[in-house]
Structure formats: C-alpha cells, structure tokens
Image: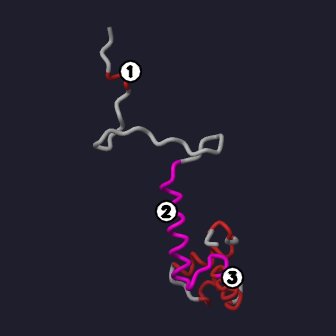
Amino acid sequence: MRDPGRLTARQRQVLDLTADGLTSQGIADQLGISARTVDIHRANLLRVLNARSIAHAVAIVLRAEHAAALSPPASPEGRTAPAPATSRAGAPAPDAAAASPAP
C-alpha cells in the first residue's frame, strides 16, 4: 500500500530531512538519535510505502500531497463538494438571477 498517511511522524521527519539532502548522520544529529536509527526509519518507511528507493518514496509522498491539494474539499456529510460552475473561458459562470434584467 502506498498511503503516506500511514507513516509515523518520525518516519515523515526522516523522509523530509532526506529530501532536504541530509545524510543519515546529519539527520541523526538534528533529531538527537543515532545514524543506525535513521537507517531503520528509512527501511521502515520504504516498506510502508512499498517504495524501491528513497527517491521513489519522496515521489510517492509528493504525488499524494499534490493530489490532495487538487481534490475538492469534502462537505460536512463526508461527500465531495461539487465544483463551482465555470464558463468556457474558465471564469465563474454568471449567476442566472444576476444575468436577467430586473422588471
């Protein structure tokens, strides 16, 4: 399963710091843990994401975050809210009541 939401907070920290270019020792120093513990967190996050490499894991997370940012917000009932109507040019569609002249 490739659900980034299943990562622990520490696994996500290790992934983020790895994506920032830090080495295992650099991550260990920043988080106050050993480099071996960093390597264990990396191995576990690869397993959770079913990723082939750290680069693949970063790509999985970025794609999931991008998809989440593009999806419409859920309504209070848990259903996805309908997208607002737009004109062909992509501008918001004029309101029918506002478009008709007043009597």
Q: Secondary structure at mark 2?
A: helix
Tell me residue 56's x, y (percent).
Answer: 52, 80
Residue type of the residue flagged with mark 3: Asn
In terms of image quadrants, where is residue 22?
A: bottom right
Point out the tag, 3 or 1, that comes first from the N-terminus. Answer: 3
Which residue is denoted by mark 3 in the rendering?
44
Mark 2 Cα-neighbour bin, 10 Å: few <14, some 14–19, many ≥20: few
Task: Look at the image and say whether residue 13 sits in the magenta stretch.
Answer: no
* Residue contact at pointers 2 and 1, CB within 8 angstroms: no
Task: Look at the image and say whether residue 63 sits in the magenta stretch.
Answer: yes
Which quadrant would the C terminus be assigned to in this image?
top left
Highlighted range, magenta: 47-72
Tell me residue 44's x, y (percent).
Answer: 69, 82
Which quadrant would the N terminus be assigned to in this image?
bottom right
Mark 1 Cα-neighbour bin, 10 Å: few <14, some 14–19, many ≥20: few
Mark 3 Cα-neighbour bin, 10 Å: few <14, some 14–19, many ≥20: some
CA distance for labels 2 and 3: 23 Å
**Secondary structure mostly taken by the magenta-highlighted segment of the chain:** helix
In the displayed structure, 8 sits above or below 44; it is above
Q: Secondary structure at mark 1?
A: helix
Residue type of the residue flagged with mark 2: His
